Amino acid sequence: MSVSLDLLPQTAFVFLLIFSRLGAMIMMLPALGEMAIPAQVKIILALAITLVMMPLVMDSYGAIPSSIAGLATTLFFEIAVGLFIGMTARIIMSSLHVAGNLIALQTGLSFAQNVDPSAGGQGVLLANFLTMLAVALIFASNLDHLAIVAMRDSYILFKPGAALPVGDFTQVAVHTLSVSFKLGVQLAAPFLVMGLVFYVGIGILSRLMPQIQIYFISMPANIGLGLALFMLLLGAMMTWFMEGYEQVLMQFIN
């Protein structure tokens, strides 16, 4: 048996393009692309998924472009598609930061901060907790498999060699941002209501009994009520978020 060496450039070219799209997507996806995961692990994961995906999608690619500009344009298209899908899923994760910051503001825990492993900077403690819990639930509920399905179906939605749909990208990005902010406010809505009722009650109490040191009474009560409500609603909040995350990924699945 003899293997023709003429196929090697085409095979290497297709492998590079697939790796560019999937690698860019993995670097941005929640759970798979967290900053706490070493870059070497992400690269190995991208290479492994590329090897598995290559027999399924290699027919989508044509011949090697004859010019450097054509090669650069094709490579840019693949990276842009991967970054777009990954960033769309990443944007919906920001709803947890919105919810966590609103909850911390209403419960008096805004100054309780620590390092956010997903962003690499300081963040509100409750927002960081919700983010890490969401990452754990994505793996526990196998929604990371849905991301891999989106990788495969992206070759149906965004065919290699076609024009980059900048208008569609912009429309989806704006819609996802609005959905993310709306979801964050919805998750924090019970705490907004609690804060409103609590501070109205504290204001009435301070008028009725002005001699009471209202600050030393209200702060512990506010934190205690907030944490109790957070404990009761955490399961429902994360279920609501997981449904929203699934709907965002489903728009990339044919």
Image (cartoon, rainbow, N blue to C red):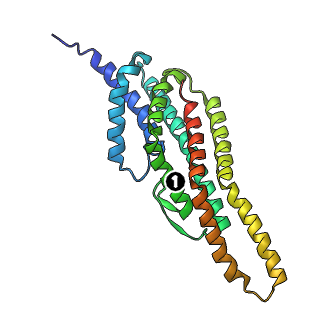
Residue 106, image x and y in percent?
68, 65
The quarter of the picture where residue 117 lies is bottom left
Secondary structure under the numbered disc 1 in the rendered image = helix
> In the depicted view, which residue is nearer to us: 178 or 13?
178
Residue 3, image x and y in percent?
20, 13
Q: Which residue is the extreme one toward the front?
A: 232
Instruction: Determine which residue is flagged by label 1.
Output: 131
Q: Which residue is the extreme one toward the top?
A: 1
Residue at the (71%, 60%) spot, across then down? 192
> In the depicted view, which residue is nearer to us: 30 or 162?
30
Q: Which residue is the extreme one toward the bottom?
A: 211
**In this view, 102 is above or below 166:** below
Residue 103, image x and y in percent?
64, 61
The quarter of the picture where residue 193 lies is bottom right
**In this view, 247 is above or below 194:** above
Q: Determine crowd level at label 1: few under 14, some 14-19, many 20+ residues with C-alpha closer than 10 A.
A: many
Can residue 142 be spotted in the picture? yes
> In the depicted view, which residue is nearer to us: 227 or 38?
227
Query: How many numbered callouts?
Result: 1
> Which quadrant is the N terminus positioned in?
top left
> Which quadrant is the C terminus positioned in?
top right
**In this view, 208 is above or below 102:** below
Residue 61, image x and y in percent?
43, 18
Residue at the (80%, 81%) spot, across then down? 206
Residue at the (34%, 41%) spot, across then down? 43
Can residue 108 be spotted in the picture? no
Identify which amino acid the numbered label 1 is placed on: Thr
Residue at the (57%, 46%) spot, across then down? 239
